Amino acid sequence: MQRFLDLNISRENELQNIVTLAAETCQAAAAVLVILDQGKLIAKYKAGIVAEQVTSRNIFSYIQLPPGQVTVIPDTLRDQRTAYDVLVTGPAGIRFYAGIPLITHDNDQLGALYVLDGESKTLSPRRKGMLRILAQQAVNMVEFDTSLHILKEQFIDAKNSENKLRSFFESSKSNHLLIGRHMDVITYNKAFFETIYQLMHIRVEPGINVMECIPPNYLDDFISHFQNALAGKSIQHDRILQFKDGPPIWTRISYNPAYDEEGKIIGVSFNASDITHRKISEQRILEQNEALRKIAYMQSHELRKPVATILGLMNLIKMQGYGDNEELLVMMEKTVSDLDSSIRQIVTMTETQPRVQDVLKENYYNQDDIDMDW
């Protein structure tokens, strides 16, 4: 595409060649090609000395030119349409006229091709056919030039959009892969390429079967989820993937159907992120939570047992009378009661806190579509 867009084609030279060839083909003294845009003259090409004397905006513009036909006036002095035209009576002295409109593929007239001469003559069917071919060639050249200009603009816009999308695509640390309906690799980002090469020693290329890039312990799950995604379902789950000669990796994997502009599913978008560090952090939180629960158990059973015993003894002493140590014993009773109250409060707070597992699931996961492993 880039080589095609870089072609150095001069529309000016090509159209000038068409005008010159038209004059030579019809053995006429001059030929003129005019190009219009919404009725305004935007270009004029001339060939021959007589044509240099034609300075009007459009040659015999009042003459109707039927599409696909060559209109011929063998003698302009004897035709009422042209007999009094300045191009006939003036210095140009045009006596012969032939014209054909330039009609685009969508039936718009973008100008006309004229053949002129200072002597009366006519055109043979063969030369009329040649003139029609030259007119069509002029149309093709103008449309090609316009299409090429539009294509260049669209190509530049598409390239810019592609570069932005590719930059975003490549900047992600997650592994992204687009898979065709037949499990062929369509495209991927740098992270996916490097991950597969590092863990499986496989160089990913467009067109290879994606099964070559999937670790054996995950093949069954992959096929099942891939087929569900092709059916229009989005799937996301966490899995431990075991690669050859490598440590197990906690991976968050998602499958989403990929659609074309018409809404048809053309493949599956596969995304995988390494969440090993986060899983390790979650496990540490779980272990800490379990340690807190053990501490709470110890407080509620091991510590409260001697405290309860002391409180019982204090009640017995109170029933028998404090004696000379009343102030000291009352103070001891209050201290033991405060200790018991603190233990009860700690146990109550521990039991009313939400489970760490539930908090993590609520914050990070959707139980409807994610498999959980704790």
Image (spheres, rainbow, N blue to C red):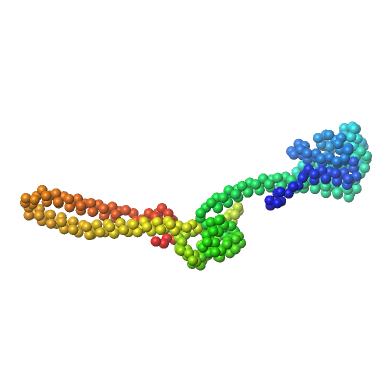
Residue 190: give x, y in percent of width and height.
Answer: 55, 56
Res 119 quadrant in image: top right
Residue 170: give x, y in percent of width and height.
Answer: 55, 53
Res 300 quadrant in image: bottom left
Above-or-below relation of 86 to 316: above
Residue farthest left in this picture: 323
- At a point 77% along the width and 39% down the height, the residue shown is 36
Of the pair 322 and 97, the residue shown nearer to us: 322
- At a point 51% along the width and 65% down the height, the residue shown is 215
The C terminus, quarter of image: bottom left
**In-image side of 275 versus 355 (left or right):** right
**In-image side of 111 versus 372 (left or right):** right
Res 29 quadrant in image: top right
Residue 268 visible from this viewpoint = no
- At a point 71% along the width and 51% down the height, the residue shown is 4
Of the pair 334 and 269, the residue shown nearer to us: 334
Residue 306: give x, y in percent of width and height.
Answer: 18, 58
Residue 322: give x, y in percent of width and height.
Answer: 8, 52
Residue 307 visible from this viewpoint = yes
- At a point 85% along the width and 46% down the height, the residue shown is 21
Of the pair 293 and 112, the residue shown nearer to us: 293
**In-image side of 348 versus 8 (left or right):** left
